[in-house]
Image: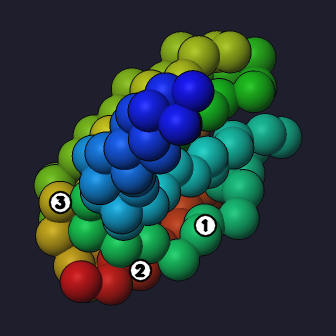
Amino acid sequence: MRFLFFILVALAFAGFLVGGPASAAAANHDIIIAQMQFGTVPLLHVGDVITWRNDDIFRHSATARDKSFDIDLPPKSQKSMTVKQAGKVDFYCRFHPMMKGTLDVQP
Ligand SMILES: [Cu+2]
């Protein structure tokens, strides 16, 4: 019985080493497009994943001014991307250039 307990503790610790700190480093964020507007843009870090979700019945895109990404978003669709470099990147929608925002990515 005591041996079984030891095994469980060892497994829990191993799980912490493998899954704990590594998975805590990167975060997932949703940026929701609705009513012809980009929703709140979270503060980001390199390695984070952004899921762009289009809740509209119109096609949109999330397109970087510096061309570092160009995500096509048909109505009621979503796509994810990993943030690869630090800095500010302005983005807009190719179909509705009035729609825009800025990613602020920390190292
Ligand atoms: Cu649009």
Residue drawn where x is 83% and y is 40% of the image: 35
Query: Quick check: 41 left or right of 106?
Result: right
Give the residue pinned by disc 1. 41
Label of residue 104 in the image: 2
Q: Mark 3 and mark 1: span between their CA atoms?
A: 16 Å
Q: Can residue 75 be seen in the rendering of this structure?
A: yes
Q: Earlier in the sequence, mark 1 or mark 2?
A: 1
Quadrant placement of the C terminus = bottom left
The amino acid pointed to by label 2 is Asp
Q: Residues within 10 Å of mark 1 (few under 14, many from 20)?
A: some
Question: What kind of element bears circle 2?
Answer: strand
The amino acid pointed to by label 1 is Val
Residue 81 place in picture, x, y as percent: 32, 40
Give the residue pinned by disc 3. 84
Does the CB distance between marks 1 and 2 fall below 8 Å? yes
Question: What kind of element bears circle 3?
Answer: loop
Front one among 59 and 20: 20
Tell me which corner region of the image, top left, top right, bottom left or bottom right, holds residue 84.
bottom left
